[in-house]
Amino acid sequence: MNSPSGPGVQPQQFFFRCIGCGDLATSAGQDFRCAKCSDLLEITYPGWRSAGPDPSHLKLAWCQRRLSQSAADLSGVWRFRELLPSLADDNEIVTLREGNTPLYELPQCSRITGVERLYAKHQGMNPTASFKDTGMTVAATFARRAGFRWVACASTGNTSASMAAYAARGGMRSLVLVPEGKISWSKLSQALDYGAVTCQLRTDFDGCLRLLQELVRRAPVYQLNSINPFRLEGQKTLAIELLEQLNWQSPDHIVVPGGNLGNSSAIGKALVEMLDLGLISRLPKLSVIQAEGANALVRTIRESGGKSLVAVQAETRATAIRIGNPASWKKAVHVLEATGGACEQVSEVEIAQAKAEIGAEGIGCEPASAVTLAGLKKLLTQGFVKRNESVVLVLTGNLLKDPDFTIDFHRGELLKENESARTSLDRLRRPPIVLDASLEAVMKTLEQAQ
Ligand SMILES: *Cc1c(COP(=O)(O)O)cnc(C)c1O
Ligand SMILES: [Zn+2]
C-alpha cells in the first residue's frame, strides 16, 4: 500500500551545489568534489525557492506515516523523504529501520548541571548502534541505484560497521579501511560479521581517508565517507525527528560532538532548511564539542577566525572523534555562524566523568558522545548557555561500542598517568568485585555499599 502523501507533498528534485564557488550540477564525480574548484558538494532543492512544500501538510503526512507498515514509512529517515533526494520508487530503499530514536530526559545530569530542561537524543539506538545509519540508508540506496557493486569507506569504526551492514542489505560488497590498533573490537567485529573486506592500515584515520580518495579515482568503488553528500541528507533527519518529538518547538541549544564534522554540518543544514520552509519559527544554537587532543575546529575558529583549516595530530581515547583533518570543516564553520553556536574542547578527564554520569542515568553512550555533557558544563561556566534554557545533547553512539573504555574507567586503569585526575573520579567508579562464592562475602559487600 502506498503511504499517504497530502497535496503539495512531492518527492524533491535535487542538484549538487559547490560550497566554495556555488556551481550547480546535476551529477557528481566519484570524489564528490566540485569539478571547477574541488571544494565539497552539498545537495540542494531548487524547487523550494519558488514553492516549497507546505509545512502543515508535511507535519501531517509525517505523522500519518507512523501508522503505515511500508518499509519507507517504518524508517525514521525515509518517513521524512520530502526533505531528501527523490527516488522514483520506494522499493529502491536500502533500510534497516534506522532512526526512530528516543529522546530521553536526564534527571541526574539536570541536577549536576542545574539545567532543568536537559534531554538526550540517543542515536546509539540505531540498528548498528550509531547515528551513521541515518546517513548510510540514503547513501547506500543511491550507490545501488547508480549500479555500484562495491562501496568503500575510511573509518574510526562506526562508519565501517554501518556501511558493511547497509551494503550487505543492499546486495553490495564493501571495503573498509581502518587505522590498525586504534578501533574498538566491537566496531571491528561488526564490520567482519556483516561481511566487509576489512583492511587495517598502519596509519591513522586521516591516512586512511587520504588513501581512499586516491582509490576512488582509480577503481569503480563508491565512496561512503561523509564527503558523500547523500549521507549528510540522511543525517539531517536527526534534527527533523528531534523537532517533531519536541512538538516543533525549538530548543535553545543542541550540542553535538565534532570529529570529521559531517554530523554537525547535517544537523545545521536541517535546522536552516526547517526554518526556511516554516517548519520551525526560530533556530536553536548548534554547538560543536571536540576532544582537546583532536581540536581542529576549535583551533580553526580561534586561530584563523574560521577562514582556513588548522589541522592537528589527533590523540584521544574517544576514538570516534580521533580526527585531525576534518573533511567538512567549512560546512561546520558555516553552521556555527548560521545558528550562532559555540565551539569548545574538553579534556580526557572531563570526557570520562561525563560518560560515567550519562551511564548512571541508565542509558550510557560511547566516549565520543560524552563530550556533549562535558562541553555543556563549560558552556554554562562561560555563560553561553543559561540554566533556564533548554538543551538537547546528541548521543552519537551506544555504550557497547567501546566496552574497553568503560571497564578501564571503572577498574581505575584509565588516565593512569594523571593520578590526581584519576582520584577525582573515584566516587564514580564501580569496579567489579571478585569474591569467594559465599553468602557471607556477598552480604558484607552489600552492607559496605549502602
Ligand atoms: C562518527 C562519530 C562521531 C563524529 O561525527 P562526525 O560527523 O565525524 O563529526 C561522533 N561520535 C560517534 C559515536 C561517531 O560514530
Ligand atoms: Zn566549486
Image (cartoon, rainbow, N blue to C red):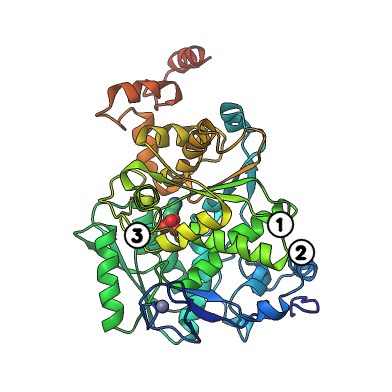
Q: Quadrant of ligand 2?
A: bottom left
Precedes in sequence: disc 3 or disc 1: 1
Q: Nearer the viewer, mark 1 or mark 2?
A: 1
**What residue is disc 3 on?**
308
Element marked by disc 1: helix
Q: Nearer the viewer, mark 3 or mark 2?
A: 3
Residue at disc 2, CB closer than 8 Å to ligand 1: no
Task: Give x and y (percent) for residue 160.
Answer: 38, 63
**What residue is disc 1 on?**
244
Q: CA distance from mark 1 to mark 2?
A: 9 Å
Q: Residue furthest left?
A: 202
Q: What residue is at 40 percent from the left and 53 percent from the top? A: 305
Q: Mark 1: few, some, or many residues within 10 Å (few <14, many ≥20)? A: some
Of residues 343 and 228, which is closer to you in this image? 343
Q: Nearer the viewer, mark 3 or mark 1?
A: 3
Q: Mark 3: few, some, or many residues within 10 Å (few <14, many ≥20)? A: some
**What residue is disc 2 on?**
63
Amino acid tagged 1: Glu
Amino acid tagged 2: Cys
Amino acid tagged 3: Ser
Precedes in sequence: disc 3 or disc 2: 2
